[in-house]
Amino acid sequence: MKRLVVGIGGVVQHLCDNHVVTNGGKSTLAKSLYEQIPNSYIIPQDSYFKDDCLVPVDRNGFKQYDTLDALNMNKMMTEVDSWRADPLSFLRQRGLNIKSSPAIKQVYVLIVEGFLIFNYRPLNELFDKRYLLEIPYDVCKRRRSSREYSPPDPPGYFDGYVWPIYQINLQEMERTTSDIVFLDGLKPKEELLAAVREDIWQEIDRLKEKN
């Protein structure tokens, strides 16, 4: 049994009515990969936010959703480690159909998607492939401002917290990880999917050839 762990990272989050909203496209990419790669499974980082009352607040009164302190990473790692121990049993325990084909018969793929997956060392060390979707400041701000959030962003939240913390997290990723594939989030989603899917299939083929 062979395993491949893929990380799909992206831009900042927003917690809205207990659901995380993002504007970068990583969730769409991860779900599309899951639909097209047999024996795969997605673990989304945004499923592990702590209760809102436990999310820290900075000196300006802004909720710090975009930090590791806002996430229950121990719980997330328990799920990841459970998959790594036995992917087949992991999938069966969750009632998922095992989609086998001759091309990928013994390769199981875990897709981990989130905004800080490359900033948490115990998780980052597990990735075989790393992809990061990027969009520029003006596009990210426009997309965010075009949506209605509940609760709404407080005045100055994007420029005072959201974008600066994204830049800090990005710089940390670049310092600690050298093999991230940066993706242009402005490209059509079909083009991005095709490129990443092809790269992953090549890695699957490589794993198949190993004894």
Image: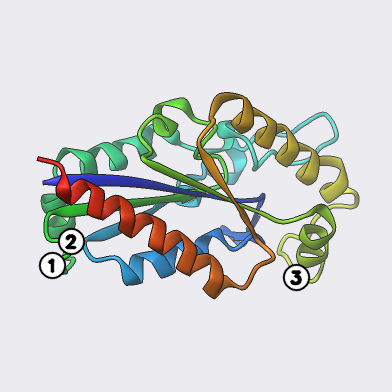
Number of marks drawn: 3
Q: Identify residue for label 3.
A: 147
Q: Identify residue for label 1.
A: 100
N-term mark: 3 or 2: 2
- State the SS at label 1: loop
| Disc 3 + disc 2, Cβ < 8 Å | no
Residue 34 x %, y %: 35, 65
- Disc 1 from disc 2: Cα separation: 7 Å
| Disc 1 + disc 2, Cβ < 8 Å | yes
Residue 41 x %, y %: 30, 58
Q: Which quadrant would residue 74 be assigned to in this image?
A: top left
Q: Residue at x 17, y 65 (%)?
A: 103
- Disc 3 from disc 2: Cα separation: 40 Å
- State the SS at label 2: loop
In the picture, measured across the screen, residue 179 lies left or right of residue 199, that is: right
| Disc 3 + disc 1, Cβ < 8 Å | no
Would you place residue 41 above or below residue 62 in this image? below
- Disc 3 from disc 1: Cα separation: 40 Å
Which mark is nearer the camera, 1 or 2?
2
Given residues 61 and 75, the one toward you in this image is 75
Q: Identify residue for label 2.
A: 104
Q: Residue at x 62, y 38 (%)?
A: 55
In the picture, measured across the screen, residue 116 lies left or right of residue 103, that is: right
Q: Residue at x 48, y 67 (%)?
A: 193
Would you place residue 122 above or below residue 105 in this image? above
N-term mark: 3 or 1: 1
Q: Is residue 28 visible?
A: no
Residue type (three-letter) at the residue carrying disc 1: Ser
Mark 3 surroundings: few (<14), some (14-19) or many (≥20) residues within 10 A:
few
Mark 2 surroundings: few (<14), some (14-19) or many (≥20) residues within 10 A:
some
Residue 191 x %, y %: 55, 71
Residue lying furthest right in this view?
155
